[in-house]
Image (tube, grey):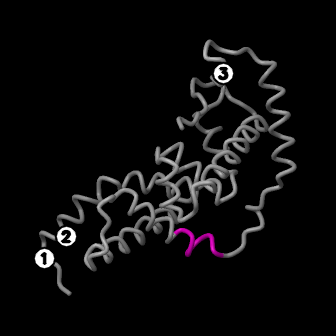
Amino acid sequence: MRQNKTENKNFEEYTFPHLEDIYRTAMYLLDNESDAQDLVRESFIKAYESWHEGRFDPGCRIWLFRIMVNVLIKKHWLSPNPSSAINYTDEVDGYLMYSRWAKQQSIDSTGQVPFSTISKDDVKKAIRDLPDNIRLIIVLSLLEDFSYREIAEIANINLDTVKSRLNRGRKLMQKNLFDHPIRESNYAIPHGRR
């Protein structure tokens, strides 16, 4: 079926404002520029095809992210990846050690431990070190600011799974940030808003 210029323009008007967000997320999830570009390209091709087949979702941003996540899972995450398995005993032990250390540090006026010595690169590394399924939830929540319900829709998982993975992800990030050298910076660790 041949599409007219108006339909193409409408697709661009609705989807292109989200291109940068999709690319940023792809980079955090794949950590490889070429793979991220391929993921974004294929996601937008699938979105374009769906648009012209009448399967467009008016919640365009969520719809685009859902397409990207589906492509990501099929192309990059379907094969078992032993490196993405979590040792929950290590996770809990590491978090408890981190908690003890944090209590010994000075507390700011909000009752939080200041993390002014954590750089953006430290946070990026902590995110990259997360298992795939948890990294996806952390990126969608903390970087893209999706609600729990929106994340559940995008990742096609239930709400409790979103909450559980987000909780595990935050603990793992704290452990990862505690485990590697912290450089001087004014960047603060993101804290959830929900």
Q: Do the residues labelled 2 and 1 touch (CB within 8 Å)?
A: yes
Q: Distance between the residues labelled 3 and 2?
A: 49 Å
Inspect the image, locate mark 2, and give the three-letter code of the amino acid beneath it.
Answer: Asn
Q: Give the spatial CA distance, label 3 vs label 1.
A: 56 Å
Residue 123 quadrant: top right
- Measured as percent of width and height from the top left, residue 120 is found at 58, 36
- Pointers 3 and 2 in contact (C-beta within 8 Å): no
Q: Which numbered disc covers residue 112?
A: 3
Distance of mark 2 from mark 1, alpha carbons?
7 Å
- The mark that comes first in sequence, 3 or 2, is 2
* Residue, far top: 109
In the image, residue 179 sits, relative to residue 84, either above or below, namely above
The answer to whether the residue labelled 3 contacts the one labelled 1, judged by CB atoms less than 8 Å apart, is no
The residue sitting at 58% across, 53% down in the picture is 137
What residue is at 69 percent from the left and 52 percent from the top?
130
Question: Does 122 sit left or right of 147 as displayed?
Answer: right
Image position, residue 53 (x, y; %): 28, 80
Looking at the picture, does residue 81 appear above or below residue 124? Answer: below
- Which dot marks residue 8? 2
Span colored in magenta = 72-78
Q: Magenta stretch containing residue 11, yes or no?
A: no
Mark 3 burial class by Cα count in 10 Å: few <14, some 14-19, many 20+: few
Q: Is mark 3 on a helix, strand or loop?
A: loop
Q: Where is residue 122 in the image (x, y as percent from the top left)?
A: 65, 38
Q: Which of marks 3 and 1 is nearer the N terminus?
A: 1
Q: Mark 1 points at which residue?
A: 4
Q: Which mark is residue 75?
A: none
Q: Main secondary structure of the magenta part?
A: helix
State left or right for residue 129 relative to residue 58: right
In the depicted structure, whether residue 187 falls above or below residue 174: above
Q: Give the residue type that dot 1 points to.
A: Asn
Secondary structure beneath dot 2 equals helix
